[in-house]
Amino acid sequence: MTREQFSLSVALVVKDAFDNGILRDFVRKTGLEPVIEWAPTTVILASLEKGKRPDGIIVTDDALAGLVEKKIVVPNALVPLVTSKIGIGVASGAEHPDIETVDAFKATLLKARSVAYSLGGQSGLYFAPLLERLGIAEAVNARATRIPAGFSAEKLKTGEADIAVQQISELLAIEGTEIVGPLPEEIQKVTPFSGAPLADSLQKEKVEAFLAFLRESKSAERFRKSGLEPR
């Protein structure tokens, strides 16, 4: 039997949770199949600017606010989903460095052979200026492994970096990554993510059904296992 499909553009932050049961559970329950294009929020916004129109999106709250202003999304259609913290990952079995305090975190970054981070995702957009604020940008970036978009922990697998910085859930999306912990609270950034159907979608009901499913208790459990906090 052919499943009824609908399209979504989704931020990478929820990929681990989706891959580890959420999508399978939804298809089994409803017979509906989301066709997902994964990308950082910034890339999704750029594609919308160029005229791409999926049936629904999951991005940061800030991004959705801008889309409401442009009437791409209807205000009352927004569904709060999760909040995400930035963390540090290392390859499985590697020593876990000290990141308990801001000073310890700075020392760890300065000692690292190479720190991997994404320039296009929410974590990278925050982390690059954070290095400047901490006064270590020049030293860290001289050896950093910076990627335009995608999963920074991939660089742990290739050996190009020994520390990866990203949203904790995105670090967990790459097999063989261990989470050292979140950034110290004083320099942490918590990012809220929500979903919505696009205003001109003909598949609004399917998107709404999926977003409602993401707020059910079993989905919330899977989000927590992936380092996210359900809202």
Image: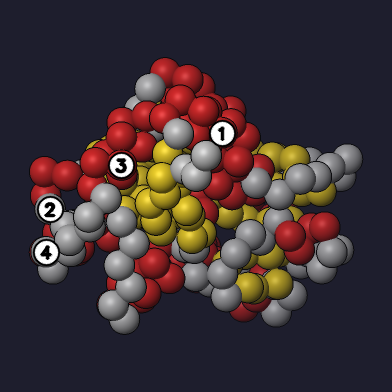
Residue 179 in the image: state x and y as whole percent: 69, 40
Q: What is the CA distance from the residue labelled 1 to the residue labelled 3?
A: 16 Å
Q: Which mark is drawn over residue 206?
A: 3
Mark before the other along the chain sequence, 4 or 3: 4
Residue type at tag 3: Lys
Residue 153 in the image: state x and y as whole percent: 71, 56
Residue type at tag 1: Arg
Q: What residue occupies the far front of the structure in this picture?
A: 1
Q: What is the CA distance from the residue labelled 4 to the residue labelled 3?
A: 20 Å
Structure colour scheme: secondary structure
Q: What is the CA distance from the residue labelled 1 to the residue labelled 2?
A: 28 Å
Give SS at disc 3: helix
Residue at 82% in and 68% down? 160
Residue at 12% in and 53% down? 74
Give SS at disc 1: helix
Residue 209 in the image: state x and y as whole percent: 30, 34
Q: Which mark is drawn over residue 71?
A: 4
Image quadrant assignment for residue 172: top right
User: Does residue 176 show up?
Assistant: yes
Pointer 3: residues within 10 angstroms few (<14), some, or many (20+)? Answer: many
Residue at 30% in and 67% down? 53
Residue type at tag 4: Lys
Report which residue position mark 2 lands on. Answer: 74
Report which residue position mark 1 lands on. Answer: 24
Mark before the other along the chain sequence, 1 or 2: 1
Asked if disc 4 and disc 2 are in contact, CB closer than 8 Å, the reply is: yes
Residue 211 in the image: state x and y as whole percent: 33, 37
Asked if disc 3 and disc 2 are in contact, CB closer than 8 Å, the reply is: no
Give the number of the mark in front: 1 or 2. Answer: 1
Q: Is residue 227 above or below residue 118?
A: above
Q: What is the CA distance from the residue labelled 3 to the residue labelled 2?
A: 16 Å
Give the number of the mark in front: 4 or 3. Answer: 3
